Image: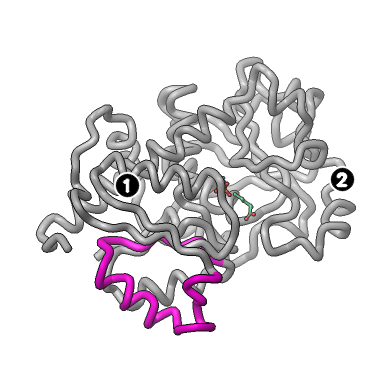
Amino acid sequence: MRHILEIDDLNAAEVVEVLELASTKEYPKVLDRQGVALIFEKPSARTRNSMEMAVIQLGGHPIYISAEEIGLDKRESVEDVTKTLSCFHSMIGARVFKHSTVERMAKENQVPIINLLSDEAHPLQALADVLTMQQELGDLQGRSVAYIGDGNNVFRSLALASGFLGMEVRFSGPSEYFISDEDRDRLNFAGVNVTEYDKPEEAVKDADVVYTDVWTSMGQEEEKNQRHKAFEGFQVNKELMGMASEKAIFLHCLPAHRGEEVVDEVVDGSASRVWVQAENRMHAARGLLIWLIEKHLGGRETI
Ligand code: CP
Ligand code: NVA
């Protein structure tokens, strides 16, 4: 059984297969009459809607479950929730605070677990990101992505996915917010190298893609003031975009904190592809679901 908790739960060839399935206009009814449980410990607009629609397009039935309702480790243990939901559903997607929660779910090995964002990773976002870059730039081998800001969940997954496809991955942010040594080792193990730049101007120089995410992620609200100070000078604005390649595109996983990590004229500007990127969340999710079912659940009895 395959669980997708981070991009490196796939190899590079498998990421390519998922992207191909994401691009097909055929929606096989591989989830006919099957349920997919979607647990959310944090809010969501894109992830919930894209996953629900992807499940529906494949003939299945998504069920949204809020943290309050399911009470992970409060009303019932994560393990017992996983076993229970597996009685009714063919897969479980979960957006959680602690990455260890999705790891514990996967350990039960009842049905495939898909990480819908944890404090460490956001793999479905990264699949949509590389799909968008491919659509815009074609073959990504040798192209460059410059990520400016916080070395967070979105960055780690993006680095893995874009590195797998042969991109040069650059990072610029305050050094204390770069990914951990452990994460850097994990990336290196996956064959992905990230070049760290002190100055965002150097990181974006001639880059094909400029990417940023919020400085304060969900669950870090108490650190907001301290983070604002630390990230000063790492805003993606028109001047910074002007230093990237002439045809550079701008990406952001959204939601954007306009006026903080990015300004209106970049999000709404001609280089921005953020809405295509948002739509691609649904296509990428569908591609991954088809891949998981066709390649790894082929023989499983439907519920
Ligand atoms: N990009 C993303 O995951 O958006 P949501 O938090 O709205 O799901
Ligand atoms: N890094 C952000 C991404 C939101 C989609 C967060 O975790 O809140």
State the SS at label 2.
loop
Q: Residue at x 75, y 34 (%)?
A: 202
Q: Earlier in the sequence, mark 1 or mark 2?
A: 1
Q: From the image, tell me which residue sits under label 1.
A: 55
Identify the image quadrant of residue 105: bottom left
Query: Disc 1 marks which amino acid?
Result: Val
Tag of residue 232:
2
- Above-or-below relation of 166 to 111: above
Where residue 284 sits: x, y (%)?
39, 40
Relative to 270, residue 259 above or below: below
Is residue 48 shown above or below 75? above
Residue in the image at 58% along x and 59% along y: 184
Q: Is residue 88 magenta?
A: yes
* Colour logic: one colour
- Taking depth in this image into account, of 3 and 12 the one nearest to the observer is 3
- State the extent of the magenta-drawn residues as a range: 68-96
Q: Horizontally, is 92 left or right of 261 in the view?
A: left
Residue at 62% x, 37% y is: 252
Q: Is residue 211 above or below residue 292?
A: above
Can residue 208 be seen at all in this image of the molecule? Answer: yes
Amino acid bearing label 2:
Glu
**Viewport quadrant of the C terminus:** bottom left
Q: Nearer the viewer, residue 178 or 249?
A: 249
